[in-house]
Amino acid sequence: MTATASRNPVLDYAKGIAIILVVTGHLMTGETGLEKWIYSFHLPLFLTVNGYLQGMKPVRQTFGQYARKETRVLLYPFAVFSFLKAVINFFVESDPEEFIDPISRLLLFSGDGALWYLPAFFLSALLFFFLRKTGLLRWEGLLCLITLFSSGAIAAHDPYQPDSLMFYCNLINRTLVLSVFTSLGYWYRRHENRLPVSLLNGFLLVAVGFVTGMLNAQPDIHYSILGNPVLFFASASATCMGILMMLQNLHLRMNWLGWCGRNSMLIYLTHTTFHYTGMARDIMEMWTASPWMITAGAVCLVMLAEIPTVWLLQNPLKWLVQCSFFRKAGATHETAQSS
């Protein structure tokens, strides 16, 4: 959650770009057309960064240790903010169903609204760790092929309803989709020295990602909607690698973007749960009718609201995202390891 001396600023900048585009995507309503491209890569960029980080260090943890760490980082805040969303929605909407839905989605491990991403990230991280630990990463290409053929069928059969088989197929499929991008980041890190990493090549990759993304229908990994899967993977992969290449060669000094990246989890948890996006858009619509101005202004308002929110979650309210039980257990394990 906070910066350390060993942090790679390029990865923080990449996550900062990703979280700003996530907020932007949740504020767009289809007037600009850029949603098709943004939705193809903003979440995969997080997974690509995660894979890059995995490629920087050897596997020393057992599967159980890794699962425990990811539970602390992802599932604990997922549970807390699902409950918070249920309570907030109930008071805002005055409808008991608005309280029940986030709780039921928590119990079904699917997540309500934007919170779907946390359990999906958790499952994809465990899958990637297992494949890497067992030396089966070469099968990741097969998982990509499975999503190419399965996503369309799942998306066409209303995967939102939990009483259908497609609901559970969707949970599996979106996990596979996300794990592909973790492998992409891992592959990029492992072959970085042999790749033509330059500012120009990064720009060209982003351009290819933009064109293929705009040629595709708007994707939504939440419901396994990829449009044309080939165009989706081409757009997301090219854009994610292009962004990393450009950031590695630009040598930026942008503290605010690094702050967004370091706190991307907190911003993701709160920007829709606390209704910041809805309130920001309502405010901007009172001042202008331009879709571009509404979206840009609302993004700025949301990010301003996140400054005190992040501070609160890192200080007096840190128990909302950090479980003391996990911290004590982790400290005990580290002490035992060192002795």
Image (tube, rainbow, N blue to C red):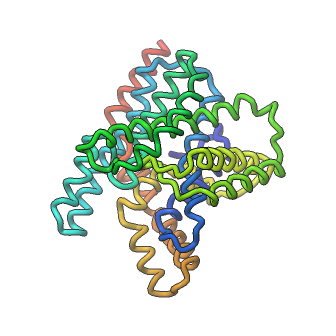
Left or right of residue 78, residue 288 in this image: right
| Depth order, front residue of 197/301 | 197
Q: Residue furthest left?
A: 96
Identity of the residue drawn at 43% across and 49% down: 222
Q: Is residue 302 above or below residue 129?
A: below
179 relative to 274, above or below: above
Name the residue: 78% across, 54% down: 203
x and y, in percent, of residue 43 in the image: 53, 49
Residue 54 falls in which quadrant of the image? Answer: top right
Residue furthest out toward the top: 339
Q: Is residue 105 above or below residue 122?
A: below
Position in image of residue 304 (x %, y %)? 50, 68
Residue 282, image x and y in percent?
A: 41, 78
Asked if residue 11 shows in the view, the reply is no
Horizontal arrangement in the rendering, residue 28 relative to residue 109 (left or right): right
Give left or right: position of 82 versus 223: left
